[in-house]
Amino acid sequence: MKKFSYKAQKADGKIYTGTLEGESKTEVYAHVGAEGGTVVSIKVAGGGFILKLNKLIGGVKMQEKIVITRTLAAMLKAGLPISRALSVLERQSANPLLKDTIKEVNTDVSKGLGLHEALAKHPKIFSKLFISMVKAGEESGTLTEALLVIGKQMERSHSLITKVRSAMIYPAIILIAIGIITVLMLLFVVPTLTSTFDELGVELPAMTQAIVSSSAFLQNNFLLVFVLFALFFGVMSYALKTERGSKIFGVIILHLPVVSVIVKETYTARTARTLASLLGSGVDMLHALEISQEVIGHPSYKKVFTESHEHVKKGDSLSKSFMEHTELFPILMGDMIAVGEETGAVSDMLLEVAEFYENEVERKTKDLSTIVEPLLMMLIAGVVGVFAMAMIAPIYSITESI
């Protein structure tokens, strides 16, 4: 049982509040309705700790959204009423937040709201892209097909992002490991050898002296160094969330060797698939561009969508802006859109572009892993070699003087 606090309005317009224990918000609506009032707002009081914790640390994973979308489409295709299908999804869901959300959506749908209107009340879970495609499906009577398209679109986008991230995980782990090993050597290994050199009165080479000085500084100021590093990463994390910081990072990543090509092709694939899904579901071009701008997110790409929106609004072709920004989109993107505009099959051409560049990104991320691995091995060998040479050089000079 949950405890709900609610605000309601009487027939004479007077606002009042109250609390009620029940299984769902439906019971609150029924209770207030029986009193002759109208519910203004409802909140879970006290007992929603698990839900609040889930919202804070977990939310709803993309894979969960893909599963419920495909399952809902399958049930609707089998002939189940939407309310019954949502009830089944609610029972199947193991995520407390998702279960509660589906229950609220089902309640709203049972009260006469359209599915897209019910979903729109949960913008943190269901994106604008998702809601717009559901709306287009409801209006055209092709909700099942729209849900299948959404499911495929989310699955391919999620798969693409996962593959790119996976390619970056291995180098990141290696670099972190190198950093930890370096710190441990400076804190524990170098001081032991330094005391030996001091006892022998050995004159240290410049490279050895630099490592010894770094070790001494780290030992004497470990807390300060730790705080500075934590502060640096904290400031960087905050800066990346700001509009200016996000823009600067976006520009930098588009100019990094090797990586920039993969990044550009990733954004091209996401742009093409998002537009193809929206246009294929019946969303008008201007609205599709607005939604795509939010989905893509990158500041540089947002500018292209803004220009495209203005061009289309004036009656110009969609392909014009994409052809003008070949520094962001490959030439193929603009050409394929132009062909689609001439043949009346823009959505189909965009889908071809999406699949082509998704395959390209997958291939290049595999190639990148193959290239990065030996480079990382060379980096590890270099770090170990520097330490070894720096520590062996004084010992070698002692043996020569004997």
Image: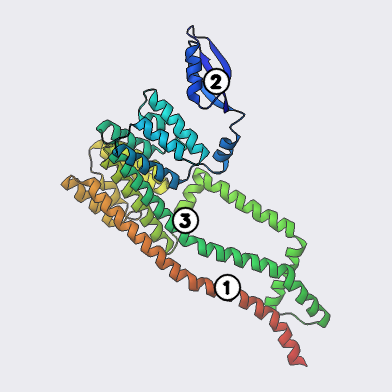
Q: Which amino acid does label 3 sit on?
A: Ile
Q: Name the residue under label 2.
A: 6
Categorize mark 3 by other alpha carbons within 10 Å: few (<14), some (14-19), many (20+): few
Q: Nearer the viewer, mark 2 or mark 1?
A: 2
Q: Is residue 67 shown left or right of residue 210?
A: left
Residue at the limit of the structure toward the right, as seen here: 199
Q: Is mark 3 on a helix, strand or loop?
A: helix
Give the answer, above or below, for where 166 lies relative to 320: below
Mark 3 or mark 2, whichever is nearer to me: 2
Judge from the rendering whether residue 259 lies leftward or rightward of residue 145; answer left or right.
Answer: right
In terms of sequence position, does the residue under pointer 3 or pointer 1 come before the other? 3
Residue that numbered label 3 is attached to:
252
Q: Identify the residue shown where x is 73% and y is 87%.
A: 397
- Work out whether mark 2 precedes mark 1 in sequence or the reverse, and give the earlier one: 2
For residue 380, which numbered disc appears in the image? 1
Say whether disc 3 or disc 2 marks the residue closer to the N-terminus. Answer: 2
Looking at the image, which residue is at 27% across and 50% down? 351
In-front residue for pair 237/30: 30
Tell me if 79 is positioned left or right of 390 in this view. Answer: left
Residue 28 in view, yes or no: yes
